[in-house]
Image (spheres, rainbow, N blue to C red):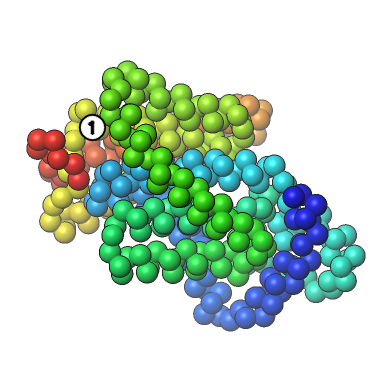
């Protein structure tokens, strides 16, 4: 597989050069915006707004599906270690293939190229939402966004077409398996005691991290630990409802995002103060702590503020929103 991926690099590079020939001022603004929809910040916004304003169960399932697939993507990237299109390591390969023109990417990425995390994540996340929100118009929008996010990675010059195709295929297969397994996992989880629920919310992401202890896995599994604890605690102490008038939902989204982004960027600054003094192991540990705190703020901290301020009511009976 690795040899095959290296052999098709010149073909993929030529496709990127052809796409580069399509660029114009409008598309140079549009596609970076689209690619940001599939970025870490894009998913922080999307997941948060769904959780606070639309549906808690959908967001909870989506968060687990997306963050586990990102851990899988990190492992695949590190398994094959294919360089990005602008990596100098590709120069001998391109010269031997007779490719003389060089790509001018609009973005720069340093992680391995195969598979495209944006493509894989888009297939899983928007595919999952299309499954949950059973509206024809939404499903059409979801398919369009999956295609545009995947194509945007080639347009900005950070992924080969084989990365994008592979990401979409792996994402689609993963999504089908997840949709089959999720009802069984939810049913079993519902029968567990509180202590076991908290233990699994922490130990399962930690087990995934131990298998592949790198910063990419630490990011997704750290966030999952914080969210998992936040979800459980919210269900025991707050049980806020996503229902409400439109202005309540708007204010919820604005207030919640402000709190989460303060935590996200504040901890990022704090991380930066110690980054150069850390070894690789401590960098992974700190990243887990940082993203766990951000996840907990989104999962429990922001809803606590909503109920405290009257922007969200509380569920009655056994209903969920």
Front one among 6 and 239: 6
Q: How many residues crowd mark 1 within 10 Å: few (<14), some (14–19), many (20+)? A: some
Q: Nearer the viewer, residue 175 or 301?
A: 175
Left or right: where 277 falls relative to 269: right
Quick one: quadrant of the C terminus?
Answer: top left
In percent of width and height, residue 241 lies at 17, 43
Is residue 274 positioned above or below 47 on the image? Answer: above
Image coords of residue 155 (percent x, y): 60, 70
Secondary structure type for disc 1: helix
Residue found at x 62% / y 40%: 75
211 or 295, which lies in front? 211
For this orientation, the residue located farthest to the left is 316
Q: Residue furthest right?
A: 96
Q: Is residue 261 visible?
A: no
Residue under the image location 75 percent in, 55 percent down: 5
Q: Is residue 71 left or right of residue 245?
A: right
- Residue 272 is situated, as x and y percent measured from the top left of the image, at 56, 38
Residue at image mark 1: 235
Answer with left or right where residue 312 lies relative to residue 155. left
Q: Nearer the viewer, residue 131 or 115?
A: 131
Q: Residue 231 appears at what percent x and percent y?
A: 30, 34
Q: What residue is rendered at 68% in x and 42% in y?
A: 78
Res 249 seen here? yes
């Amino acid at each position: 597989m690795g040899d095959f991926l290296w052999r098709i690099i010149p073909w993929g590079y030529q496709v990127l050069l052809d796409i580069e020939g399509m660029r114009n001022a409008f598309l140079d603004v549009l596609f970076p915006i689209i690619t940001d929809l599939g970025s870490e910040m894009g998913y922080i916004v999307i997941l948060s707004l769904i959780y606070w304003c639309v549906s808690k169960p959908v967001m909870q399932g989506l968060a687990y599906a997306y963050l586990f697939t990102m851990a899988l993507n990190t492992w695949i990237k590190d398994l094959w270690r294919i360089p990005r299109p602008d990596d100098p390591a590709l120069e001998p390969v391109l010269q031997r293939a007779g490719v003389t023109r060089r790509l001018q990417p609009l973005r720069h990425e340093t992680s391995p190229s195969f598979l495209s995390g944006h493509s894989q994540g888009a297939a899983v996340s928007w595919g999952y939402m299309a499954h949950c929100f059973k509206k024809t118009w939404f499903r059409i929008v979801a398919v369009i966004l999956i295609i545009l996010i995947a194509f945007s990675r080639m347009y900005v010059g950070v992924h080969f077409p084989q990365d994008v195709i592979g990401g979409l295929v792996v994402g689609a297969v993963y999504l089908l398996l997840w949709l089959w397994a999720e009802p069984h996992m939810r049913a079993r989880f519902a029968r567990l005691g509180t202590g076991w629920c908290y233990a699994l919310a922490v130990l399962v992401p930690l087990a995934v991290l131990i298998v592949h202890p790198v910063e990419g896995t630490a990011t997704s599994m750290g966030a999952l630990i914080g969210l998992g604890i936040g979800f459980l605690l919210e269900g025991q102490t707050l049980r806020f409802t996503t229902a409400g008038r439109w202005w309540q939902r708007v204010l919820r989204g604005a207030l919640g995002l402000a709190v989460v982004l303060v935590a996200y960027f504040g901890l990022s600054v704090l991380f930066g103060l110690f980054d150069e003094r850390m070894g690789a192991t401590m960098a992974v540990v700190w990243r887990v702590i940082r993203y766990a705190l951000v996840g907990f703020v989104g999962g429990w901290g922001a809803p606590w503020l909503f109920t405290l301020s009257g922007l969200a009511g509380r569920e009655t009976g056994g209903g969920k929103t």
